[in-house]
Amino acid sequence: MSRVLLTTFGSLGDLHPYIAVGRALRAQGVDVCVATSADYKQPVEAAGLAFVAVPPALSDLGNAEELGRWLFDPLRGTGRLVRGIVMPNIRAAHAVLMQAAADCDLLVSHQLTFMTPVVATLQRKPWLSSVLAPASLLSRFDPPVLVPLNVLQIARRLGPWVYDRTRGMVGRIARRWERPLHALRRELGLPATPQSLLFEGQFSPYGTLGLFDAPLAEPRPDWPAGMTVCGAPLHDGTAADPGALAQLQSFLDAGEPPLVFALGSAAVWIARDFWPQAIEAAQRLQRRAVLITGSTASLPPLPAGISAFDYLPYSAVFPHAAAVVHQAGVGTLSQALRAGRPQLLTPVGFDQPDNAARAVTLGLARTLRFQRVTAADLVHELGPLLNTPAYADQARTIAAQLAGTDGAVIAARKIIQALG
């Protein structure tokens, strides 16, 4: 039996697609191991997949709220993630992955698992790269939206020469973040590369899996060779508490479709002030609401017509929403697109502003920066979203387009082809 090693790092939005792909591979008779943070041992093994813990563990990085505010800094967040968390752990990750990959026939990398291509090269094994969102492709023809300085889109409007110079500057900054990685590559006898391994250097010569939905980005001439847009592989988390699902159903049955507020698994770390604003906005709009907060412990007393949950599978609640308000993480967005409901997007950081802009371009969403959210802002944006039929119509159109796409199955098929 062939064996595949799937590597990933980050939030649940970075984990769930690989669990989905792993399950699809298992259904085709391929043995799968997922290598990621120790925090995710339970959900990986609950899905029937082998698990290997790779440093760092998120639980070792300190207080979640402090970590979230440090990482979600709009200007410095990506550099802090790479320099402050990933790079100090690359030697430990290398040791773990060398052992985990020893009995594997093919490896699949994530943008932040820098050791995966290193290990594949050292062990002379094929590997596929993967990207979860179009922003990671950094296309000259479709530059990502960045905040607070949208330098790449501005440079693109000024012309190809300006864009290339700006893109080169971004790459040089990333290479400085990666100095420990390039030093380790030299020690291991691997050739030097002028590329940033976070950006253009992340892509495999064996092929790249685009684990995002096709409506979000048209193919571009400068996408990596061997790129396949598979569609989003969906895994809706661990099984929900039956009591929570029963409570949800009772709430849904008791009145009109609610607003649903959800912020994924990482933005909730810094959402203490968000939920009171969401509650007030729902009351001003005279709308019922469901809040999915990660933890309900710090919420104020809830007024009538508002229900809150630590966790719900998005597929159980999004289709019943009047509108979905979320952080535009690509996993949350993928579930919301399939629900066919209009969306208000409150991006926090990383690829989320770009994901939000793409959903707005599709005509099914409006956007509001998370850092500026007030009840008045939410009311101002939700009013047109709820009262303009075009948003709901376009949401249903996109949902219908995605209904027959199973990104996990398509990705599994490409992996099996690469196994030969």
Image (tube, rainbow, N blue to C red):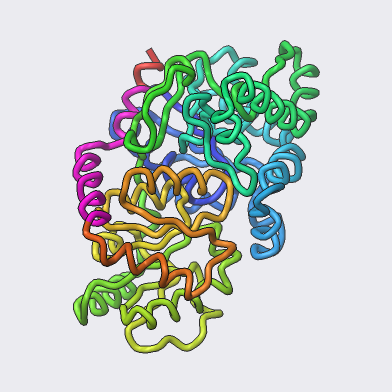
Report the residue that reaches farthest toward the front.
158
Observer-nearest of 341 and 285: 285
In this view, the residue in front, 414 or 124, is 414
Q: Please name the residue shown 29% across and 29% down the image.
A: 28
Residue 121, above or below 176 = above
Q: Report x, y in % for residue 299.
A: 51, 81
- Picture quadrant where residue 118 is located: top right
What's the residue at 60%, 41% (across, down)?
150
Quadrant of the snapshot with the C terminus: top left
Q: Main secondary structure of the magenta part?
A: helix
- Which residue range is magenta in the image? 390-414
Q: Is residue 177 left or right of residue 311?
A: right
Q: Is residue 22 above or below residue 45?
A: above
Which of the 4 image quadrants contains residue 280? bottom left
Residue at the image position 47 percent from the left and 57 percent from the top? 327
Residue situated in front as seen by the camera: 89 or 33: 89
Report the quarter where the N terminus lies: top left
Q: Position of residue 331 (x, y in %)?
A: 42, 48
Residue 1 lies left or right of residue 168; in this view the side is left
How many marks the image carries: the answer is 0
Q: In the rendered view, tell whether residue 102 sits above or below residue 299.
A: above
Q: Position of residue 204 (x, y in %)?
A: 53, 18
Question: In the image, is residue 405 part of the stretch drawn in magenta?
Answer: yes
Residue 94 falls in which quadrant of the image? top right
Whether residue 102 is in magenta: the answer is no
Q: Residue at x 20, y 38 (%)?
A: 404
Q: Position of residue 297 (x, y in %)?
A: 53, 79
